Image (tube, rainbow, N blue to C red):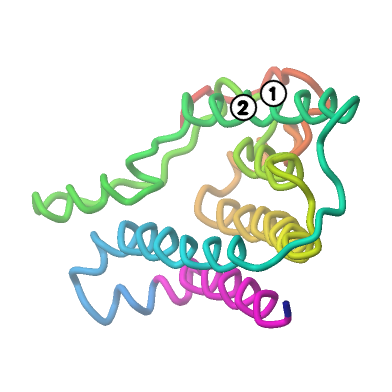
Amino acid sequence: MLLLILLWLCWCALHSLLIAAPVNDWLQQQRASWRGTYRLAYSLFSALTLLPLLWYQASLPQEVILSWSGWLRIPQAALLLYALIMLIGGIQVYDLGYLVGIRQWQSWQQGTALPVLPFTCAGVLRYVRHPWYSSGLPILWTVGPLTDVNLPARLILSLYLVLGTLLEERKLRQELGEPYRSYCKQVPMLLPWKGRVAVQMPSTI
């Protein structure tokens, strides 16, 4: 169990470190090709290191603490529906090619200027600033039974999602400036408690 906790902590720390602006900038300065390939390499590295960790966790003997059965299926279904809405909403407004790093790699291959960080406040982003982080929390706690083995991982990843959101916020404020800071004052970060907000700025910046 201790090994599993350490592995999850190491994965979260490494994942955050490699995407941090100082590390990102330093690596790109070391080699010109990293400017167009780093984001894509980071996405692949994150996925490939996550899979064996999930496999190792699933291979451990586990004792069920809580099973989503009986009347508990009602809140489970409601939370999963919310997560699905946030996921689909994010897909509709995010530039997936940029997030994964495909657009940067294509620009580097073609010898053109790298695309700038896109920002939009349309669609689901009028309800919540980080729909995918918002969907991650209910997914973490409602998919599969809660066991003595996956409980620490769920706690670690929940904390990581919240901290990751705050770090992402700081990065976006620095890169996008006043338009994003104005947007933050109007739209909630994770929970869409205000409903649909009529954001006072152009829908795309």
Residue 153 shown in magenta: no
Which residue does the image show at 73% across and 32% down from the upper left?
Answer: 187
Q: Which mark is residue 145?
A: none
Span highlighted in magenta in the image: 2-24
Which residue does the image show at 81% across and 36% down from the upper left?
Answer: 68
Q: Position of residue 149 (x, y in %)?
A: 74, 65
Q: Secondary structure at mark 2?
A: helix
Which residue does the image show at 25% across and 69% down from the upper left?
Answer: 34
Q: Quadrant of the N terminus?
A: bottom right
Magenta region, main secondary structure: helix
Residue 134 sits in quarter? top right
Contact (CB < 8 A) between labels 1 and 2?
yes
* Amino acid bearing label 1: Leu
Q: Nearer the viewer, residue 203 or 107?
A: 107
Residue, disc 1: 81
Crowding around mark 1 (Cα neighbors within 10 Å: few <14, some 14 to 19, many 20+) is: some
Residue, disc 2: 84
Residue 15 shown in magenta: yes
Query: Left or right: 192 with respect to 14?
Result: right
Q: Position of residue 45 (x, y in %)?
A: 38, 65
* Amino acid bearing label 2: Leu
Q: Nearer the viewer, residue 188 or 41?
A: 41
Q: Is residue 14 above or below residue 175?
A: below
